[in-house]
Amino acid sequence: MCDLYSKLVVVSGPSGAGKDTVVAKLLEKDSDISLSVSATTRAPRGNEQNGVEYYFLSVEEFLEKVDNEGFIEHEQYGANHYGTLKSDVEKRLSDGKTVILVIEVKGAANIKKMYPESLSIFIMPPSLDVLESRLRGRQTESEADIQKRLGIAADEMRRSVDYDFIVVNDTLDDAVNDAYNIIKNHSK
């Protein structure tokens, strides 16, 4: 366990880059690191559980929270809505945790505006070919969805220059160590 102090860390990257896997390993590595659980309107995948990987909301529930300013950021990504619950982040920060937000590129830009002291890390796949292989390996999306995600990924990768740090997820252990050292050693 390192001596982290309360800070907000934004982690983004294209679908299939491994950002969730990198973050899961960071959480195992240090109990001072906490994950903000995002809300989404997409259906759970595999064994995902409500309140663990995401808060799974209906579109109506999600939009009600938008109307009541319950999110610090929210975006539509593809056909689904995603957002970061204000109450979840504020509680974790007040508990002295380093809070990681795994959010899309548009949401990350909004967080940087609202929390300029936050740290941002972009998880980059080694190449678009590797990314495509990872997406196909999931076997959860149609061909049209894969092509759409690849188009979105190319745009997101171009916007990676807006982040404080870029971590290439070629070898998982190296990516985790790089991200951990960034969180541990850099403050805004």
Image (cartoon, rainbow, N blue to C red):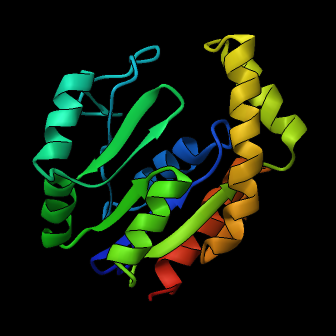
The residue shown at (16%, 64%) is: 90
Judge by depth and name the residue closer to the eye, 53 or 128.
128
The residue shown at (39%, 18%) is: 44
| Furthest residue toward front | 67
The residue shown at (38%, 84%) is: 117
Q: Can the viewer see residue 55 in this picture?
A: yes
Query: What is the x, y in percent for residue 109?
Result: 49, 66
Q: Quadrant of residue 8?
A: bottom left
Query: What is the x, y in percent for residue 59?
Result: 27, 24
In this rendering, position of residue 30 left or right of residue 143:
left
Does residue 124 lie above or below 147 as drawn? Answer: below
Does residue 58 lie above or below 70 as drawn? Answer: above
Give the mark count: 0
The residue shown at (61%, 13%) is: 140
Q: Can the viewer see residue 124 in this picture?
A: no
In this rendering, position of residue 173 left or right of residue 102:
right
Quarter of the figure that contains the N terminus: bottom left
Judge by depth and name the residue closer to the eye, 160 or 50.
160
Query: What is the x, y in percent for residue 122?
Result: 62, 61
In this rendering, position of residue 114 left or right of residue 123:
left
Query: What is the x, y in percent for residue 38?
Result: 32, 43
Quarter of the figure that contains the C terminus: bottom left
